[in-house]
Image (cartoon, helix red, strand yellow):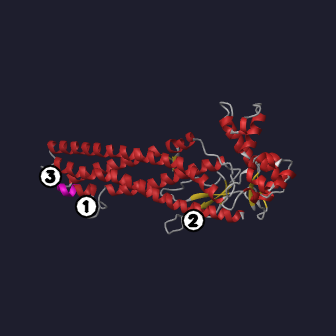
Amino acid sequence: MADSWNQQLFDAMVRHQIGVLRFTAGVRQRIFEILDATESDMRAQIADRLRRNIGLSLTDANLNRTLRLIEKLRETRVEAWKDVNAVMFEELRAYARAEPAFQVQILETIFPVELGLALPEVSRLAAIVNQGSFNGETLQQSLNKMRDADVRRIEQSVRMGMVQGESIPDISRRIVGTVSLKGTDGATEITRRNAAAITRTMVNGVGAEARREFALANVDVAPQEIFVATLDSRTTPICRALDGKIYDVGTGPKLPLHYGERSLYAPIVDGEVIGDRPVRNFTQQQLVREYAEKNGLGKITGADRDNLPFGHKGSFDDFARARMRELTGVVPAKTTYTQFLRRQSAQFQNDILGPTRGKLFRSGSLELSSFVDKAGNEIPLSELAKFHADAFTAAGLDPAEFK
């Protein structure tokens, strides 16, 4: 059954990657809209600055006019790149925070047990975007490099148009392309292609690193991961070769492997942890009691986390995560909840059922089904005492006290 659940996890991760590609397309479109908005401005600037003397010799006046135009175009484009920069960091920071939460959601949905999964520290997720290296460059370095190349192509297009004596429309087309072809025949189209590739690379790189941080924080639950390549004609040879290979967490080739990377790692949950049927051999109250005893806190009212002394909740959470994993085990698939509960301690049963129903379950021979009505609502103790007086007596309880 563990294999079946891991297959479901694999399928869910592949479906999620499709969603990531859609997210990438949305980020890319936002960047295109920012850059495209400057192109109409640049057309107007070219028309305004080069209205005269086009096609004539490069006089000092013409040269100065050209230099002023180049400076104006640079200012326009650099301002746009500031907005691109803000969008990329905003989207990727949000994505880095969301990706580990998705991992928790999918694992908790597929596996019928609480695994005590840990989320990476927010500071580590932020560092992925701010300091992470993808193909040898940080996000900021990649954006700066793309911005500089974009501005340089625009400047070169203006100079070349001037040298060749082109008309104003020709210089505009050289830079931003024609409207009929949606700008695909201009110098800025190279920027759009590069922006698309870098966006894919950065989104997948940030996602891969966020998942890596999550996997390392939960390596005792999912100690291995499988490399998953996209199954289409654009998959690179390296990703085709790695597809399906299984690695211990953190030991496989680091993603992204190339620009435009779309591959990912899917976790493989340990068959020793997730066997025929996982079980949680603990309760929240039990964990609080154990923590309190270990730290000399005495008896905690109601054995509730919220009642722990100030400054202990964070330490308790760390303790509880580790203890939950220790107490997570497996039983045969056909084991019922009643069978499982009967094997647990009286305190565990009381935590689940309450002390009175715990006694009725242990000593009064009442099944769990006796505690609920047909609609699934818990039957009050007064009604139980009325219809199961013998069970109360057998458990050492006086049914009259519950009427």
In the picture, measured across the screen, residue 138 lies left or right of residue 356, that is: left
Q: Residue at x 52, y 65 (%)?
A: 235
The residue that label 2 is drawn on is: 240
Please identify, in this view, whether the residue under mark 3 or under mark 2 is nearer the observer: 2
With respect to residue 355, does 24 lie above or below? below
* SS type, badge 1: loop
**Residue 386 position by quadrant:** bottom right
The label shown at residue 66 is: none
Determine if the magenta segment contains residue 169. yes
Q: Residue at x 36, y 45 (%)?
A: 83
The residue that label 1 is drawn on is: 179
Mark pair 2, 1: CA separation: 39 Å
Name the N-terminal-most of marks 3 and 1.
3
Mark pair 3, 2: CA separation: 53 Å
Name the N-terminal-most of marks 2 and 1.
1
Magenta stretch bounds? 167-171
Q: Residues within 10 Å of mark 2 (few under 14, many from 20)?
A: some
Q: Is residue 234 visible?
A: yes
Q: Could you tell me residue 252's position as x and y percent?
A: 63, 55
Q: Is residue 329 visible?
A: no
In the picture, measured across the screen, residue 182 lies left or right of residue 383, that is: left
Q: Residues within 10 Å of mark 1 (few under 14, many from 20)?
A: few
Please identify, in this view, whether the residue under mark 3 or under mark 1 is nearer the observer: 1
* SS type, badge 3: loop
Pointers 3 and 1 in contact (C-beta within 8 Å) = no
Mark pair 3, 1: CA separation: 22 Å
Please identify the dominant SS of the magenta region: helix
The residue that label 3 is drawn on is: 54
Name the N-terminal-most of marks 3 and 2.
3
Amino acid carrying mark 3 in the image: Ile
Quarter of the picture holding the N terminus: bottom right
Q: Residue at x 80, y 48 (%)?
A: 400
